[in-house]
Image (cartoon, grey):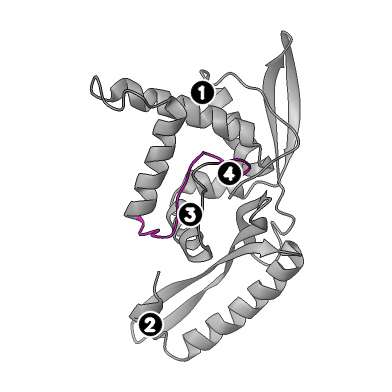
Amino acid sequence: MAGAGGNRIGVHPGDPVALRDLLYAWLIQSDSVAGYALAHHVGLALRSTAPTGTESGATPVSTFVGLMNALAKHLKMERTRFVNPHGIDDNARPMPYSTAADMARLTRYALNKASFRFYVSQKERQITFQRGGRKINYLLHNSNELLGRNGIDGVKTGRTARAGDCLILSAHHESQVIKEGPATRVLPRHLILVMLGSTNRFGEGEQLLARGWALYDQWAAGGRMVDPKTVL
């Protein structure tokens, strides 16, 4: 998901607190410059641990993007190619691409990380950075307008000229408790929704999520049968 957030937060990436605030800026307010700075920092750290002579022509950012593509391959995202850290495709060569199914695979992987779940669930977050020798406090606002409604606890908005308006949602309902004799099973209820190229991402997102929960309930009532051909 790409974000071309209008506010650019400049933070020195050598400070752990600054790195945390860059993550907030990237994930909450879609600041692509913050994402690029983090990619440079991580890529530089990775290059420092690589054997001498490895990827001699690589930049820190290209090293990071290589790791992104390696993860995509590991997650069986077979129709995805990353070419930069933020997904913005203006003048990008080769052309980046992905699919809703691949983004769902990546979202499922990311949501297994407690820290990621925390970051993307924040409606607002105040960060601090230096400008002209002065300490400045800045309040970030989450670009996901549906956050906190109807069990929605993430994940990310995005937009590019080619992909249009995009939205990934994560939502939870109260877990289902099933008593089977002396045993009790607790079944979590969680949906991930991916929309690409939407003309009304928040309105359509709410409608599709309601439809998703209705289908989920039908699936659960029917015995939770799984077709291997439809499993991501």
Question: Looking at the rendered structure, which numbered label has been put on residue 226?
Answer: 2
Outermost residue toward the top in this view: 133
Residue at the spot 36% in from the left edge and 79% down from the top edge: 229
Q: Earlier in the sequence, mark 3 or mark 4?
A: 3
Query: Would you name the residue on which mark 4 appears?
Result: 119
> What is the three-letter code of the residue carrying label 4?
Tyr
* SS label for mark 3: helix
| 201 and 60: which is toward the camera | 60
The answer to whether residue 195 is left or right of residue 206 is left
Query: What span is colored magenta in the figure?
Result: 75-92
The answer to whether residue 127 is left or right of residue 40 is right
Task: Give the CA separation, mark 1 to mark 2.
Answer: 44 Å
> How many tags in the picture?
4
| 197 and 24: which is toward the camera | 197
Say above or below: 229 vs 89: below
Q: Earlier in the sequence, mark 3 or mark 1?
A: 1
Q: Residues within 10 Å of mark 1 (few under 14, many from 20)?
A: few
> What is the three-letter code of the residue carrying label 1?
Pro
Q: Residues within 10 Å of mark 3 (few under 14, many from 20)?
A: some
